[in-house]
Amino acid sequence: MASTVTTRPCGCVCILGLPPSPRMMTVHTPRVLIACICLCAAGVAQAAEYRSAVGAYKAKDYPACARLYGQQADRTPPVRGAAYDAACCLALAGDKEAALARLAATPSDQLRSHIADDADLVSLHDDPRWTALLARHRRDMTAEMSRRDDALLEELQRRIDRDQDARNQAMLAPADPALAAAMGDVDRDNTAWLKSYLDAHGWPGYDKVGRSGSMGFFLLAQHADHDPAFQEQVLGMLQYAVERGQASGIHLAYLTDRVRIAQGKPQLYGTQFHSVEGVPQPQPIEDPEHVEARRAALGMPPLAEYTANMQDMYATPKN
């Protein structure tokens, strides 16, 4: 485990209004910080179990850490990243055989990208199976990259750039109707392109466009507010991709709330805000007593933390 601690909070808000996913964190982000965004199964009990695993890691109780992460890795569906973290704890506990067995049984796309440099796994480096494991990881990742559609990603990036440029311009002059209209034109053009692609291919998974590409497709869908029926159609595709481990559950939460608000329903995850006397506040939430459990199940930060970040960024200064 690296010693460098990032100061980027789990609840920070980027231009997409999204907290960072594990792959967006630096490769040196400690496991104790990744904990707040790596959950992917349901319920408060699992959130507590994950916190217990993190606590055991911080306390250097590596057998307990390995057991707790292992429980999450072995359930159906498994918590993404838990198998790798269990292996790290096993290695730190001195159980090299179990650590290597856990890593060997874990798909390459669920091994962290900095596996070769992870200090938690140093004790495995003198074993020939470690060399074979790294070779398999490199081979699988190279094969995954070769399957990606570079032309598609280039076109996607061009459209994201237009999307962000139009929004930046509109934010600089919010009272200018021409800029608002231009942003709407960009959204409609991007939506038409997205519809055409999804009709032909369905939602592109990580194996085709990677995690950054998946976020780009999500951004275009999230900005198709002029066509709520299409957003609802995309929601079904995204749900299926999430179930297969090929899309972000956090993206699913944002789009779910977007669609529900458009339908006049309360949101589920508290991602959509409106201004109340110049202060951003979550729009109405269904079953608010359990919103934190729903957010924790997808690795989202607490709503109070997210709300504070939104208010810091977007509250209208009082005269």
Image (cartoon, helix red, strand yellow):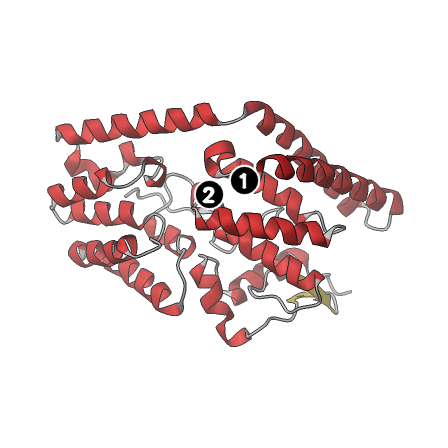
In the rendered image, residue 48, in percent from the top left (x then y), is placed at 34, 66
Give me the residue at 39% from left, 56% from top.
Answer: 39
Q: Quadrant of residue 214?
A: top right
Would you say the residues marked 1 and 2 are in contact, meaning their CB atoms lie under 8 Å apart?
A: yes
Left or right of residue 64, residue 41 in this image: right
Image height check: is 261 above or below 216? below
**Which label sits in the foreground, 1 or 2?**
2
Which numbered tag is attached to residue 214? 1
Which numbered tag is attached to residue 246? 2
Q: CA distance from mark 1 to mark 2?
A: 9 Å
Left or right of residue 288, residue 193 in this image: right
Residue at far front of view: 200
Query: Neighbour class for label 2 at 10 Å: few (<14), some, many (≥20)?
Result: many
Label 2, secondary structure: give it.
loop
- Closer to us: 158 or 230: 230
Which numbered tag is attached to residue 52? none
Q: Earlier in the sequence, mark 1 or mark 2?
A: 1
In the rendered image, residue 232, in percent from the top left (x then y), is placed at 65, 54
Give me the residue at 47% from left, 38% from top.
Answer: 206
Image height check: is 39 above or below 150? below
Q: Amino acid at mark 2?
A: Gln
Where does the C terminus fall, quadrant-wise? bottom right
- Closer to us: 154 or 2: 154
Give me the residue at 56% from left, 41% from top.
Answer: 203
Image height check: is 168 above or below 269? above
Q: Quadrant of residue 317?
A: bottom right
Is residue 20 something one can see in this rendering? no
Q: Quadrant of residue 169?
A: top right
